[in-house]
Image (spheres, rainbow, N blue to C red):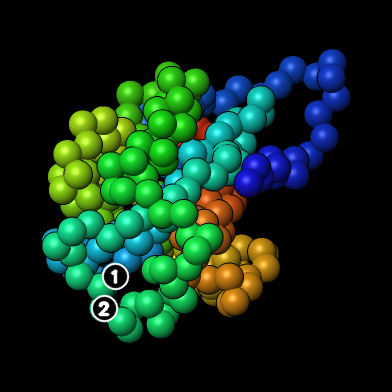
Amino acid sequence: MQVSPPTRHEHVEPSAPRPAFTPMAQRFRGFLPVVVDVETGGFDCTRHALLEIAAVPVEMDENGLLYPGQTASAHVIPAEGTEIDPKSLEVTGIVLDHPFRLAKPEREALEHVFAPVRAAMKKYHCQRAILVGHNAHFDLNFVNATVARSGHKRNPFHPFSVFDTVTLAGVAYGQTVLARSVQAAGFDWDANEAHSAVYDTEQTARLFCKIVNAWPSSPLGALSR
């Protein structure tokens, strides 16, 4: 699903010079923010299965504002030897044998999601992707465990650094729960859609872009005020 760029905060006449901003390749030290959410068979990345993964590369418009890019997602076939806690399925609502689930093996699912991430990195001349998530290390740990288990050789993500929207939303809005953070940012939240990798990723992407766009495009400019 393509998400439209955010509404501009002020109109700039075509003849007016555009304000300077930091391009994506320099904005985050050469990293491209990519919002990721996973749905799993439990909390232990070493034991529990990856069941869904979604990723949204963050884009930048001509005025330096961030907006969510196109979502890539996949349902995942539980890898042999991994476990699934039935309580996790109750929370996510995932039906493993649903005829329209169209799940992919782990390696194929990763490549389906990683390929557009690498394309976005190339577009913005970024050296690597950095995972953005709500409780981001949970998602990164499952990504890393799945990469290792499947033997995938082209993981675009930094192996341990993340941007966590729990921290960002706590600073910006005094909220840490995703639903409350999204609502505090002025967006709607549909509890019936929650705990879907695609929905949670897209909402987290909107939240991340809203917070970052409120910060000056030059970080040094903010600190020198």
Residue for badge 1: 41
Q: Residue furthest front?
A: 99
Against 21, residue 75 (above or below) is: below
Of the residues shown, which amino acid type is indicated by label 2? Asp
Q: Position of residue 154 (x, y in %)?
A: 26, 30
Residue at the location (15% across, 45% down)?
148
**Where is mark 2, residue-wise?**
85
Q: Is residue 193 above or below residue 17?
A: below
Question: Judging from the image, what secondary structure is the residue with disc 2 in?
Answer: loop
Amino acid on which disc 1 is placed:
Gly
Q: Is residue 153 left or right of residue 106?
A: left
N-terminal of the pair, mark 1 or mark 2, is 1
For the residues labelled 1 and 2, the Cα–Cα distance comes to: 5 Å
Front one among 85 and 204 = 85
Instruction: Say whether residue 27 is visible.
Output: no
Residue 152 or 16: which is nearer the viewer?
A: 152
Crowding at dot 1, Cα within 10 Å, few <14 / some 14-19 / many 20+, comes out as many
Which quarter of the figure has residue 126?
top left
Confirm or deny contact between disc 1 and disc 2 (CB under 8 A): yes
Residue 93 numbered mark, or none? none
